[in-house]
Image: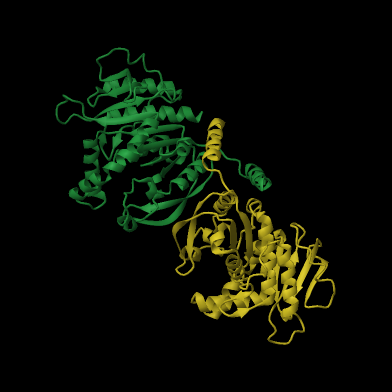
Chain colours: A green, B yellow
Amino acid sequence: MPHKLTRIRRLRDELRPARRPVMVAVAGDSAAGKTTLTRGLAEILGPERVTTIGVDDYHRYDRRERKGLPFTALHPECNHIEIMEQHLQLIATGNPILKPVYDHGTGLLCRPELVEPREFVLVEGLLPLHTRLTRACFDIAIYLDPPEPVRHRWKVERDTRKRGYTAEQVLAELERREPESAEFIRPQRSFADVIVRFSPIDGDPPGTPLSADLVLRPTIPHPDLSAVLADDGHAIQLRLTRDEDGRPVDTLRIHGNVPAEESRMVRKAIWSRLGVDAGDPPETLGGIGDDVHSEPLAITQLLLLYHLVTAAR
Amino acid sequence: MPHKLTRIRRLRDELRPARRPVMVAVAGDSAAGKTTLTRGLAEILGPERVTTIGVDDYHRYDRRERKGLPFTALHPECNHIEIMEQHLQLIATGNPILKPVYDHGTGLLCRPELVEPREFVLVEGLLPLHTRLTRACFDIAIYLDPPEPVRHRWKVERDTRKRGYTAEQVLAELERREPESAEFIRPQRSFADVIVRFSPIDGDPPGTPLSADLVLRPTIPHPDLSAVLADDGHAIQLRLTRDEDGRPVDTLRIHGNVPAEESRMVRKAIWSRLGVDAGDPPETLGGIGDDVHSEPLAITQLLLLYHLVTAAR
């Protein structure tokens, strides 16, 4: 029946001309900071231009069903990976989807929701870069890679505050998940264009805000910052290095204590390379929660914003 | 980004080679007999070869939400038509879907379910032939067209028995739905390859089983029954006529009181044209509920079976 396939495709192209969005993956382990980063980007771009999709909604089993299973929610077998691939393809080609919904509060799968792609689609979750087909859907792939002690602290804080667990339960769950984190989550790092690592730097006094180390893979064209970052020894440094696997990369380090003036200069430099006519970068950059601000986060978001906006052109 | 689309398509064709199923639409108004016909076909083919999809699951609103709306569940606005189109395209091209689920008992939308296409996919519901894109997905389109008094009687019987309504409620609902039946459901008749009408025939004594009138449009090749149905005046008649809209059609009438011997002869004739090696047509043909049997239904099912099996070749 190849005639039928042709008929369907012809009709579809005729009746549903699709406008393709910029697709961004924000991958990383549980509590790696995906939502903070994604929410910040959505705020800067404007919610009316952004669709956010959490691919952890593609859970195959609800919480009760998972209790009897030999793997955790991190395992691909525990997720509708093929449907996730299908939905990402649909969204990437400008089509709506009826997305499944997993309620993190009750642990139940519930009524799906209609999701339409806006200009930018931010896809965050545990496994967005897990298969070749999902990876083919993205214009920019980001992996969040905090050191494990930092991530564990973040997870304990969030899950005890928002999800009703005790610290002991969270730590036991982290231990239970570790083999699957190693097998399925962390290998996604090697498929990212940008790897973001918020961490303390050895030798910093206690209370120093976290620094950011960004690995910038030459898989996408990064803005040329060599002019503003010419001198070594400052709080923002660009270095040519090799990644864990030996591949050449740029790394951009933004120290947690970066002076405001230096940060402002770098932000202006990235902003000007965007070619947007407006004067200064947005003020909401770098917000964590209600009134905590992070300069390294602000520069990270601005660099990612640069990629989103240039990909849209 | 056309390169991205190409990359996605290449990968998809490489990684997910799809086997396309035979797609059958069974359209018709509420209580027109869709489930009885579909279940009968699925039994004959064998459940392991059949996927049944009820497109009434694509309701956009649950029962409570519909209460405040100016249209009934029959209205396309009340359904995720674009998602229905998308899912039918996916299934028609051999892909799985995560299908929404509407619970007719509670009137709630609930957890979606994974549906994979088997060899035959039977798609029943109110609006499967509503759009050009859905119609392009089917190999065979069937429309159930009982006279309105018969359908109303069936609906009252079913909804009072199985869905907890009173007869008055069902009749009021039928009246409320009538404008949308006329506007959206009945126009689908003109897109069907086979129209099935179970009805009493004028002049039959009370208690005569319903007869079947099948309109066989020349849009698909029907089995040549002229040899077995040469003489006029029998209980099974094939006639060249014009349909309501003037288009030429064959109509096959199977009288409710067809003698067993005549029915058997016609069934054997259709069966032999299938070229299946087994001797006799299946015994389960024509079953309605637990122990009611209808010869007109048996012949109808066999004719449809002929089309399903030939389409699969």
Residue A264, picture quadrant: top left
Q: Nearer the viewer, residue B308 or B71?
A: B308
Q: Residue at x 14, y 27 (%)?
A: A205
Estimate the x, y position of residue A155 in percent, counting from the top left. Answer: 25, 43
Would you say residue A136 is visible in this rendering?
A: yes
Residue B304, picture quadrant: bottom right
Q: Residue at x 81, y 62 (%)?
A: B246
Q: How many marks?
A: 0
Q: Residue at x 55, y 76 (%)?
A: B158
Above or below residue A208? Residue A154 is below
Estimate the x, y position of residue A69 in percent, counting from the top left. Answer: 32, 54
Above or below residue A298? Residue A121 is below
Please indicate whether residue B229 sits to the left or right of residue A231 in the image: right
Estimate the x, y position of residue B37 in percent, counting from the top left. Answer: 62, 69
Would you say residue B171 is visible in this rendering?
A: no
Q: Nearer the viewer, residue B295 or A241?
A: B295
Residue B263, picture quadrant: bottom right
